[in-house]
Amino acid sequence: MRIGIVCPYSWDVPGGVQSHIRDLAESLIEVGHEVSVISPADDDKPAALPPYLVPAGRAVPVPYNGSVARLSFGFLSASRVRRWVREGQFDLLHVHEPSVPSLSLLACWVATGPIVATVHTAMPRSRVLLATYPVLRTALEKLSGRIAVSEAARNTLVEHIGGDAVVIPNGVATKRFRKAEPLPGWPGTGGSIGFLGRMDESRKGLHVLLKAFEILAPQRPNLRLLIAGGSGDADDQLHKVPEHLRDRMTVLGAVSDEDKVRMLHSVDVFCSPNTGGESFGIVTAEAMAAGVPIVASDIDAFRQVLRNGEAGELFTTGDPADLARAAARLLDDPARRAALSNAALTAVAQYDWSVVARDVMSVYETVVLGREHAGVTA
């Protein structure tokens, strides 16, 4: 099958949707399908892009869902999308986040063939989306199939857009995370906690972890904190804790895919302290694939992926004291950590891309066959 995939967010800035699209495209290519991805990306750095990706030009930052999304929307973007659709002659288009004002919405407007959409976002009822729905409707009514990465994302789709969707979770390249050498000097003997995510986004919850670290550190003189992730200044994070604790924090900033795996294998406990706005929790699932014992905030997305606490400890969302208690229990109990590690490896197997890509492909085939049986041609 010849498949066109549309990414709404800038390929140059790491994110869960971009990672999902990359791994999906490569999984489909691996089993013999022809795949082309169009995404906002810097035209000046073609060597940094995978061969299947078509850049649609630089994106502009736009506040969205408690974060800053980098989107492309305008005459130049529309022209590139139109040309890509025309020249691609795709059997099917797969657009991601079609209600976001970016390339996916543009692709829906210009395409004439079958379209599958995936919704990743989980967010409260949006006045902006409700107000703009009449404009979006002409594009969204062309969708032939709908996927949501979680029940929370499905609820967002039903509430904002209408209709329904099949739930197919985010995928994880589990083999990529299974083994890696720890970073030099880690994890050490005094216990270590890790965090991976955008440091300057409040909803990622780093501030909750830093407060919990202040609670834990006085009783644990060798406890260390390892932080990785872009979108933030390392010195800013260090200055959020008392000066005498700063030498026990290491802030790596943005890391390569290889070092991300090494970072996960460098800590005794991984923390996902997010306060909301997550529909799945791909970083948490990646930590599960690395076999790291996890302590996570008790939000719907993490409760689902951690099987209601069977594959990881849950703490009261936004509560540093409860996070400190949960982390202390894990740090003091190697047997519990080993049990959670094994449970996480078992649980994350259902999210392996070999499973997820097959389920996505089933949606594609249903949509294409449905149009053929209805006598519709592109």
Image (cartoon, rainbow, N blue to C red):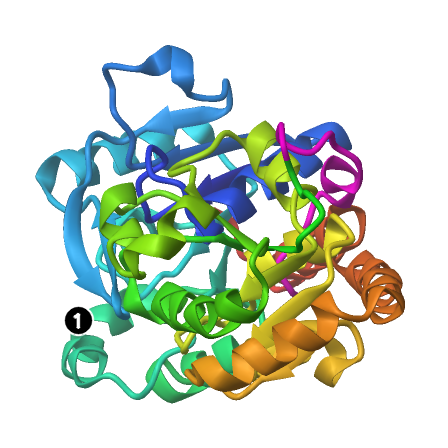
Residue 343 higher or lower than 87, as above or below: below
Q: Please indicate, yes or no, whether residue 163 appears anywhere in the rendered image.
A: no
Decide whether residue 165 is among the magenta residues. Answer: yes
On the image, numbered disc 1 is attached to which residue?
135
Which of 244/126 is in front? 244
Left or right of residue 126, residue 188 in this image: right
Q: Residue at x 39, y 88 (%)?
A: 159
Q: Residues within 10 Å of mark 1 (few under 14, many from 20)?
A: few
* Residue 98, percent from left and from top: 36, 61
Q: Residue at x 67, y 65 (%)?
A: 294
Under tag 1, what secondary structure? helix
Q: Residue at x 48, y 61 (%)?
A: 117
* Residue 67, percent from left and from top: 26, 62
Which of 55/367 is in front? 55
Q: Residue at x 18, y 86 (%)?
A: 127
* Residue 268, percent from left and from top: 70, 54
Q: Which residues are magenta?
A: 164-185
Q: Main secondary structure of the magenta part?
A: loop
> Seen from this angle, which residue lies furthest top?
47
* Residue 277, percent from left and from top: 39, 74
* Number of marks: 1
Q: Amino acid at mark 1?
A: Val
Left or right of residue 48, residue 69 in this image: left
Which picture quadrant has residue 59? top left
Which picture quadrant has residue 78? top left
Left or right of residue 371, residue 13 in this image: left
